[in-house]
Structure formats: C-alpha cells, structure tokens
C-alpha cells in the first residue's frame, strides 16, 4: 500500500506541475493571440488535469466524515 501511495503522490506532483506549466503557456498565448485552437486545446488539457488531480487527492485524503 505504501508503494501505491508513493506512486500516487508522485503522480499528483507531476500533474500539479504540468497544470502550473499550462497556466504559463496559456497566459503567453492569450497575450499574443496567434492560434486560438491551440489555446482551446491547452485549456481543455488543463481541465482534464484538474479533474485527475481532484480524483487523486480524493483517493489520498481519507474520508473522516462518519
């Protein structure tokens, strides 16, 4: 279980990092609009990352409501 938890934490860190990187890239593209399709794709990827981050966090944080 510990190994699984460690791999989930590692994955969570990678996803958060990619999510932050996309913030930077999207901000630059919006400041200098050239390819709206690219911006839309990046925003969609960012939303997917956010969903995956939320899913992983829900698996890592125990549900103490009982």
Image (cartoon, rainbow, N blue to C red):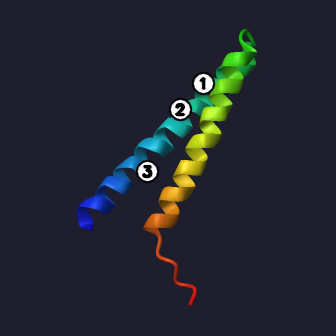
Number of on-image labels: 3
In the picture, measured across the screen, residue 28 lies left or right of residue 18, that is right
Residue that appears at 32% across and 62% down: 5
Q: CA distance from mark 2 to mark 1?
A: 6 Å
The quarter holding residue 54 reads bottom right
- Quadrant housing the C terminus: bottom right
Which residue does the numbered mark 1 point to in the structure image? 25
Point out the frontmost of discs 3 and 2: 3
Q: CA distance from mark 3 to mark 2?
A: 14 Å
Q: Where is residue 11 shown, x and y percent of the image?
A: 39, 48
Residue 12 drawn above or below residue 36: below
Neighbor class of circle 2 (other Cα within 10 Å; few <14, some 14-19, many 20+) is few
Q: Where is residue 48 shown, x and y percent of the image?
A: 60, 41
Residue 14 drawn above or below residue 5: above
Q: Secondary structure at mark 2?
A: helix
Residue that appears at 60% across and 29% down: 24
Q: CA distance from mark 1 to mark 3?
A: 20 Å
Q: Are marks 2 and 1 in contact (CB under 8 Å)?
A: yes
Which residue does the numbered mark 3 point to in the structure image? 12
Neighbor class of circle 3 (other Cα within 10 Å; few <14, some 14-19, many 20+) is many
Which residue does the numbered mark 2 point to in the structure image? 21
- Quadrant housing the N terminus: bottom left
Pick whichever, 2 or 20, lies toward us.
2
Q: Where is residue 61 shown, x and y percent of the image?
A: 47, 70
Q: Earlier in the sequence, mark 1 or mark 3?
A: 3
Q: Are marks 1 and 3 in contact (CB under 8 Å)?
A: no
């Amino acid at each position: 279980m510990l190994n699984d938890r460690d791999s989930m934490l590692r994955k969570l860190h990678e996803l958060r990092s990619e999510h932050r990187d996309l913030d930077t890239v999207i901000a630059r593209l919006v400041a200098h609009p050239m390819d709206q399709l690219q911006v839309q794709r990046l925003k969609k990827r960012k939303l997917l990352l956010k969903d995956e981050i939320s899913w992983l966090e829900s698996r890592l944080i125990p549900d103490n409501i009982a």
